[in-house]
Amino acid sequence: MFIFSSKPPNAFRCMRWLAISLWIILTYSITLPAVGQVPIIAEPRPFQFDFYPNTVVRSTTAGQVHNPPASMMTTYNIPRAGASSEEQRRSADEDIRRHQMEAAQKQKMLDKANAELDEMHIDYQFPFNDLPEKKLYFDAFNYIKKVLNGDEPMNLEATIFFVEHAYDPSLNYDEFSQQLSKAANVIGLKMAQDRISPDDNLGKIMTTFRFVSDTISVYSRKSETNITSYPKTYDFEDFWGQKDYKKMFVSKLMKEGSGQCHSLPLYFLVLCERIKCDASLAFAPNHSFVKFQDKRGAWHNLELTNGMLATDHFMVESGYIKAESIQNRIYLQPLTKKQTIVQCLNDLALGYVKKYGYDPFVKACTQLAIDNDKNSLSAHQINANYFMTLDSYIRYQYKVKRIGKEVYQQDEKAKSIYESVIGANKFIERLGYTDMPQDVYEAWLKSAQNEANKQQHTKEVKVLRGMIEIK
């Protein structure tokens, strides 16, 4: 089981958690588009401490010894030679009294020192609050972990629902599944109407593509009704889910008939899973799309945001795909189904951050993701954001507690976390990632509609349809 704490947080932890949450909201708000990559993380700069002239810098080094004040350097009585038993008793009583006073003074100083050290205590991990509503996230994590470990079959439909339901508990799986069943039924009826072999993988893909991107009408003998399906359009409003994170969801797409480059490819792949055909998720900068193979083994790209086939050349035209990104297989490469499940795990982490902020759950998600896909760009970006926010939180504690920079500079734990930020950013850079500004992304996406790309689309569709087996 995925358990962070077996006991409810005490009052102190609750107050500390609330204070930290307020700090994160007021001083470190991060906008997280969940398109396929999360935002580029700025290179961290050395922290600038405010100087506090009246602050005494105290070291927290364990085992440090301080000499006691002169008032506590007690000289014990030594009875004179030949002293009577009564004099010896009085001398011993005085020594005992002084010893007790000295012990009390030492304890008082120790209590004061411990209180000062408590004030200087630094948390090197985010606090975790085991809220009841987080159980949906833990359930989703545990399910995905079982899938990745081979203890559950790979089911993209169930995985996506687990992720979206964790964020939006109002979702109902029966409704979610029924909508997919209806869509798969229309695709099957269309294939039968066009006399496409039910075993033709390319025929299934092209019919699903047509279902998502075009208006189609079929007749159902079972219900004796005509069914008309309309294209799934691109939702230009808040397409990165910055205001409403549910804009990214497949469930929202099915309900409203519009989505974007996150939900449209996932929807397409779930339909492919339903009708048992092979297609793959792929990424470009700030973008995801579908790749599939024709009968000759050649790869093609489905750009579902505009309902067109797109070439790799069009993807590269954005100017933000480096050679390293292709070598490291983060862009333009078809993902395996396991890698697609890993991407859903990244989506789970992003939704959690959007709702609750960073804590150990996010780190557990990124670790599981990287363990199963070592070059998962989204996982590494979330991981870098995690460490950057943790580094900022530690620095914030130093400022609030007015602890001098000399102590910070000797803090090995803080230094290690800062180095994790640097290392995570450098790894992302080595993968070949370059930040693509939003306005450039929008302009690139719209360029798909130019005449040359439309002609290429028409030509490619004609060739592919010629390969489809007709009964």
Image (spheres, helix red, strand yellow):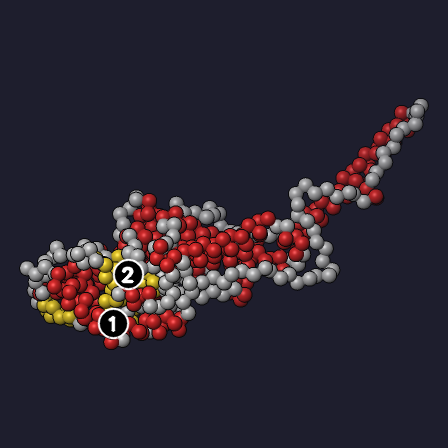
Residue 279 relative to residue 465: left or right:
right
Q: Where is residue 375 in the image (x, y as percent from the top left)?
A: 38, 52
For mark 2, what is the residue?
266
Query: Is the N terminus in the top left, top right, bottom left or bottom right quadrant?
Result: top left
**Residue density around tag 2, few if under 14, some if 14–19, many if 20 or more, within 10 Å:** many
Circle 1 — which element? helix
Q: Please give the residue where the numbered disc 1 appears in the rendered image.
A: 453
Is any part of residue 115 visible from this angle? no
Q: Where is residue 323 in the image (x, y as percent from the top left)?
A: 37, 59
Name the residue located 51 percent from the left edge and 55 percent from the top edge: 422
Residue nearest the observer in this picture, 61 or 116: 61
Image quadrant of residue 402? Answer: bottom right
- Residue 140: percent from the left, percent from the top? 35, 53
Percent of width and height locating residue 249 = 32, 64
Judge whether residue 109 can be spotted in this image: yes
Q: Which of marks 1 and 2 is nearer the N terminus?
A: 2
Q: Which mark is residue 386?
A: none
Horizontal side, residue 118 vs residue 68: left or right: left
Q: In the image, what residue occupies the spot 12% across and 61% down?
A: 468
Quadrant of the drawing holding the C terminus: bottom left
The disc labelled 1 sits on which kind of residue? Answer: Asn
Measure the C-alpha gap from mark 1 to mark 2. Answer: 24 Å
